[in-house]
Image (cartoon, grey):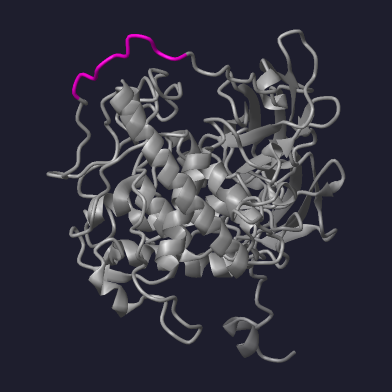
């Protein structure tokens, strides 16, 4: 055991030394909100509080899964490029560690460009994505990807079953990680399925969000890091973002080390030829790693030889008991207010969803984060167009989700509330979207509708639909021509519409416009005179009947021309 502990101490010492140098470099090169003491450490005033990041497993992209701990070489790949030089430095070609597989490097740079447009204030550098990609998967297993960026060999973290790792029950039915019992981190950026469900992006434009694709994963990682408007040009912003990805100080230091290394120069190398790290953060747990690997990858950790055991081990110093954070005290979440709600398509739900954090004794907990996620086949969104919202509980322990807006998809879906930072039972709220409806229909014209048999009606029928006094736009309506008011099905004679081929039809399915107005097509009459009925109905039960009169065609009158006998009779 002593030999093994010695290895850990040496790794920790190197990590700490490199991290100090990195922080000092960042303090010198980044925004003025960062200061460092004489040892290159951030001062307390510049370190964000614990509440500024998502602690725990459920609040991290990876579920705090293991990662590669290899540090970059002490010799930088090349002098830092000037402002006018390219970010990819050919001079770095002499260092194998500075090489990034071409497709992987392209994915990082495309993600940086996309974030520069959508979240300009984040100032995300592609080198940060490269640093995270290095420690998570060794740049997709040394660039073991296809031309479109999809990993050739699946990259999976260990089973998160609580045996040496976090305990995260399955959230994707094994769709991404092949495990229907527990979750595993997936892909080159090691997203757990529950995070990918809302953070996933389509980075290569193929219409899919695939965590095993480096373009999709890199873009998703960028959005994840920028989701709280942290500014990566400041050390505090970058620190908070990295810790939210994997809440470990060692992880932070390792990523920062690679970030600074890549900033000093790097170059593209052929896919599949990258250097894969060999040391992992779970090497000392005695577990067998099942995460990021590629075929024939050297450096797979092996079990250490049996160490000598000291006969009189020294007594370790007492570990101080950490002060529990507010998140640590939460025992469960409760629905605050309605647990189910309904809205019509296109409308905003009248009630807002709220959840309350409580201790085991039932006391409310303030200043903890609750994440609300829309789950299911729906186009409903929160105000602002997002499907996920993270809200801090107020002094009463209540987090109020943003207003929920129904889309056009009808049916049921779930809004799920989970605590950020700990794995607790979620609270589900059932939401139902009903079809657009109208409760009243009125005719827009007052002219009696008449027509001569065999002709066409001079006026078209127009109606307006309303719901609770407001215009009912995009409401489904059915127009049916009946032989009489007592009929329930379309007639077989009398007025008719025409379909696209010019055939007579007596039932039409229509929809009101955005203002609730509906103009029916031209009406025609056959040769049957009489009084008929046009019935218009809508979703929601609104009905309007319009009387249609068809008069008989005029008959020809006797001719006034005298007969032949009359014209030839002699005059008297």
In the image, residue 57 lies at what x, y percent?
A: 52, 30
Is residue 528 at least partly visible in the picture?
no
Q: Nearer the viewer, residue 417 or 544?
A: 417
Does 59 appear in magenta? no
Left or right of 383: which side holds 509? left
Above or below — where is 308 with respect to 256? Answer: above
Q: Quadrant of the C terminus?
A: bottom right
In the image, residue 432 lies at what x, y percent?
A: 64, 31
Give the dominant element type of the magenta stretch: helix, strand or loop: loop
Q: Quadrant of the N terminus?
A: top left
The residue located at (80%, 53%) in the rendering is 443
Is residue 91 at least partly visible in the picture?
yes
Q: Nearer the viewer, residue 143 or 177?
A: 143
**Corner quadrant of residue 398:** top right
Does 310 appear in magenta? yes
The residue located at (60%, 22%) in the rendering is 426
Q: Give the farthest residue toward the front.
A: 312
**Corner quadrant of residue 7:** top left
In the image, residue 166 lies at what x, y percent?
A: 45, 24
The residue located at (57%, 60%) in the rendering is 24
Number of numbered labels in the structure image: 0
In the image, residue 252 lies at what x, y percent?
A: 51, 46
Above or below — where is 192 with respect to 210? Answer: above
Q: Nearer the viewer, residue 81 or 111?
A: 81
Q: Give the farthest residue toward the left.
A: 296
The residue located at (27%, 30%) in the rendering is 289
Left or right of 230: which side holds 503? left
Left or right of 208: which side holds 504? right
- The residue range painted magenta reads 305-314
């Amino acid at each position: 055991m002593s030999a093994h502990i010695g290895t850990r101490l040496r790794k920790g010492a190197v990590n700490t030394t490199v991290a100090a140098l990195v922080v000092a470099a960042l303090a010198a090169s980044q925004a003025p909100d960062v200061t460092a003491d004489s040892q290159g450490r951030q001062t307390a005033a510049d370190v964000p509080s614990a509440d500024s990041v998502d602690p725990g497993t459920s609040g991290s992209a990876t579920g705090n899964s293991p990662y590669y701990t290899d540090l970059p070489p002490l010799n930088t790949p090349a002098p830092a490029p000037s402002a006018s030089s390219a970010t990819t430095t050919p001079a770095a070609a002499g260092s194998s560690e500075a090489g990034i597989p071409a497709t992987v490097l392209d994915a990082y740079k495309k993600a940086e460009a996309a974030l520069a447009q959508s979240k300009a204030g984040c100032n995300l550098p592609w080198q940060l994505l490269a640093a995270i990609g290095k420690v998570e998967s060794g740049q997709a297993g040394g660039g073991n990807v296809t031309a479109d960026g999809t990993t050739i060999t699946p990259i999976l973290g260990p089973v998160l079953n609580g045996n040496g790792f976090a305990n995260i029950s399955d959230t994707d039915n094994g769709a991404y990680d092949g495990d229907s019992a527990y979750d595993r981190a997936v892909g080159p950026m090691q997203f757990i399925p529950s995070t990918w469900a809302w953070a996933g992006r389509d980075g290569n434009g193929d219409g899919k969000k695939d965590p095993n694709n480096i373009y999709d994963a890199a873009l998703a990682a960028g959005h994840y890091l920028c989701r709280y408007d942290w500014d990566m040009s400041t050390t505090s912003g970058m620190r908070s973002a990295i810790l939210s990805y994997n809440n470990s100080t060692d992880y932070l230091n390792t990523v920062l080390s690679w970030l600074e290394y890549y900033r000093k120069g790097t170059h593209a190398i052929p896919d599949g030829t990258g250097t894969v790290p060999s040391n992992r953060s779970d090497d000392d747990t005695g577990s067998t790693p099942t995460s990021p690997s590629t075929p024939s990858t050297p450096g797979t950790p092996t079990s250490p030889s049996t160490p000598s055991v000291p006969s009189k081990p020294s007594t370790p110093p007492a570990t101080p008991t950490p002060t529990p954070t507010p998140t640590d005290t939460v025992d469960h979440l409760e629905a605050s207010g309605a647990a189910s709600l309904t809205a019509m398509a296109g409308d905003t739900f009248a009630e807002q969803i709220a959840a309350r954090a409580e201790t085991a004794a039932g006391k409310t907990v303030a200043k903890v984060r609750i994440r609300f996620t829309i789950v299911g086949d729906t186009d409903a969104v929160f105000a602002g167009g997002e499907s996920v919202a993270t809200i801090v509980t107020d002094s009463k322990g209540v987090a109020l989700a943003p207003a929920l807006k129904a889309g056009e998809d009808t049916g049921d879906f779930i809004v799920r509330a989970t605590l950020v930072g700990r794995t607790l039972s979620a609270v589900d709220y059932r939401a139902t979207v009903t079809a657009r409806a109208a409760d009243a229909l009125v005719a827009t014209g007052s002219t009696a509708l008449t027509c001569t048999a065999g002709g066409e009606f001079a006026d078209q029928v127009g109606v307006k639909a309303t719901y609770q006094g407001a215009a009912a736009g995009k409401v489904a309506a059915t127009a049916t021509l009946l032989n009489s008011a007592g009929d329930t099905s379309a007639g077989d004679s009398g007025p008719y519409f025409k379909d696209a081929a010019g055939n007579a039809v007596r039932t039409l399915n229509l929809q009101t416009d955005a203002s609730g107005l509906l103009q029916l097509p031209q009406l025609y009459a056959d040769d049957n005179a009489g009084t008929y009925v046009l019935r218009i109905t809508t979703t929601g039960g609104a009905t309007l009947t319009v009387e249609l009169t068809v008069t008989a065609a005029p008959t020809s009158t006797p001719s006034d021309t005298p007969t032949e006998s009359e014209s030839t009779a002699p005059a008297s």
